[in-house]
Image (cartoon, rainbow, N blue to C red):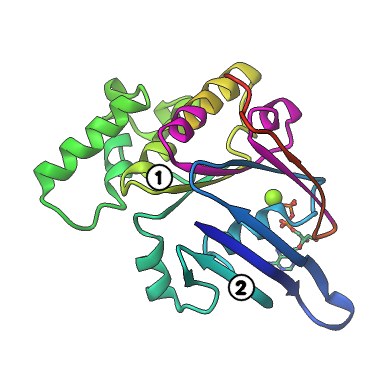
Amino acid sequence: MLEVKNVSKVYGEGTAKVVALDNISLLVNEGDFTAVMGPSGSGKSTLLNIIGGLDHVSSGEVILDGQRIDSLDENALVDVRRGKIAYVFQQYHLIPSLTALENVLLPLTFGGANNNNRKALDILRRVGLEKRADHKPSQLSGGEQQRVAIARALVNDPSLILADEPTGNMDRKTGKEILALFHQLNKEGRSVVMVTHDPEIAGYAKEVVVLQDGRIVDKVNRKEGNKC
Ligand SMILES: Nc1ncnc2c1ncn2[C@@H]1O[C@H](COP(=O)(O)OP(=O)(O)O)[C@@H](O)[C@H]1O
Ligand SMILES: [Mg+2]
């Protein structure tokens, strides 16, 4: 469903030039769970941003469901991403002044208010937060905030979820709960590409890709991901 083909990304020029990605190729099929590992600065976030259309390639191609998305403008990208790709970040990126429910409603730009409310509540229930619907992010724990962010990511029913160190701000136990949620979403058939520093978390993935200096230096494939 997603193909990254010979992608390079160069930031800056001259002495400030940084090669963040150096000729990367990667295939993500339906139902895949891919972990991206590697030291800080190795290009993990850049790769995810390029897959998600948050950043542009310097060269190479990104193909989503047969369509090249690397050269689309912002508006076209928003349309393509909606319903196909959702993003979850380490810092949650929730709107502090909005309740959990309102945050989840944000990506729902179409549909009636009642219908959308019901949908958002259903998804909050899915992530175990129906009782926190009226809470603001500051009234929620880190794990709960990440659940809201995951609910918001799910609201347009994406087939691919990109997550950049989603458990990076959590204690181990909470991180495992969040990981179990991703695992469940993957079992339902959604593809997941997750950046993580944690080898244990990467151990749940079906494929592990290791980056170093913008290159893929190792790839490990497992037929079946470990059980959560
Ligand atoms: N907007 C930017 N401008 C210049 N350099 C950048 C930018 N974003 C990332 N980089 C550089 O690209 C390299 C890869 O960064 P990043 O993808 O964030 O790494 P990781 O997520 O693996 O820590 C780093 O050397 C970083 O400093
Ligand atoms: Mg990063």
Badge 2: residue crowd in 10 Å (few <14, some 14–19, many ≥20)? many
**Three-letter amino acid code of the residue under disc 1:** Ala
Using the image, determine if residue 141 lies above or below residue 91: above
- Residue at 58%, 37% in the rendered image: 166
Q: Is residue 20 left or right of residue 173?
A: right
**Count of numbered marks:** 2
Using the image, determine if residue 43 lies above or below residue 18: above
- Residue at 70%, 62% in the rendered image: 25
User: Within the image, what quadrant is residue 49 found in?
Assistant: bottom right
Give the SS element for disc 1: helix
Mark yes or no: residue 118 visible: yes
**Three-letter amino acid code of the residue under disc 2:** Glu
- Residue at 53%, 79% in the rendered image: 71
Q: Find residue 61 and name its label.
A: 2
Question: Is 117 in front, or is 72?
Answer: 72
Give the SS element for disc 2: strand
The Cα atoms of the two marked residues, 1 and 2, are separated by 25 Å
From this viewpoint, which residue is outermost toward the front?
223
Residue indicated by mark 1: 153
Q: Give the extent of the magenta segment.
A: 183-212
Residue 186 inside the magenta-drawn segment? yes
